[in-house]
Image (cartoon, rainbow, N blue to C red):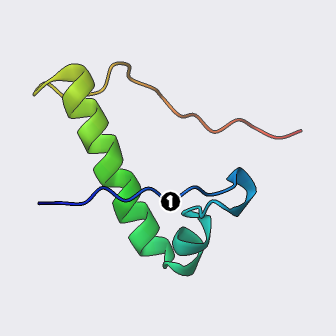
């Protein structure tokens, strides 16, 4: 039989993921972000993934 355990924690004492992610390298953070983005796109748009819009980047003359 599994015993239920409840821990009551003050909101200000609640741990956050901020310190963990700050300790990770930029590459690991970007990999995690890309994984989240892919999961969201798969959920939101199904198997079809592509650009919704096409953008053209132009270089403007300064001056």
| Residue at the image position 54 percent from the left and 63 percent from the top | 17
From the top left corner, tell me how far across and down residue 32 is, in percent: 36, 60
Report the side of 9 relative to 39 (left or right).
Answer: right
Which residue is outermost to the right? 63
| Residue at the image position 42 percent from the left and 62 percent from the top | 30
Relative to residue 29, is residue 42 depicted above or below?
Answer: above
Relative to residue 12, is residue 50 depicted above or below?
Answer: above
Residue 59 in which image quadrant: top right
Relative to residue 51, is residue 3 depicted above or below?
Answer: below
Q: Residues within 10 Å of mark 1 (few under 14, many from 20)?
A: few
Report the side of 50 relative to 54 (left or right).
Answer: left
Residue on which the image places disc 1: 7
Relative to residue 8, is residue 26 depicted above or below?
Answer: below
Report the side of 55 relative to 50 (left or right).
Answer: right
From the top left corner, tell me how far across and down residue 4 is, in percent: 30, 55
Q: Helix, strand, or loop for circle 1?
A: loop
From the top left corner, tell me how far across and down residue 27 is, in percent: 42, 73
Count of numbered circles in the view: 1
Q: Nearer the viewer, residue 26 or 59?
A: 26
Report the side of 16 relative to 13 (left or right).
Answer: left
Q: Which quadrant would the N terminus be assigned to in this image?
A: bottom left
Q: Which quadrant would the C terminus be assigned to in this image?
A: top right
| Residue at the image position 69 percent from the left and 55 percent from the top | 10
């Amino acid at each position: 039989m599994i015993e239920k355990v409840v821990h009551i924690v003050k909101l200000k004492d609640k741990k956050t993921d901020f310190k963990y992610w700050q300790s990770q390298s930029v590459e690991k953070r970007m990999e995690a972000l890309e994984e989240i983005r892919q999961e969201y796109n798969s959920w939101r748009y199904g198997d079809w993934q592509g650009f919704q819009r096409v953008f053209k980047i132009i270089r403007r003359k300064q001056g």
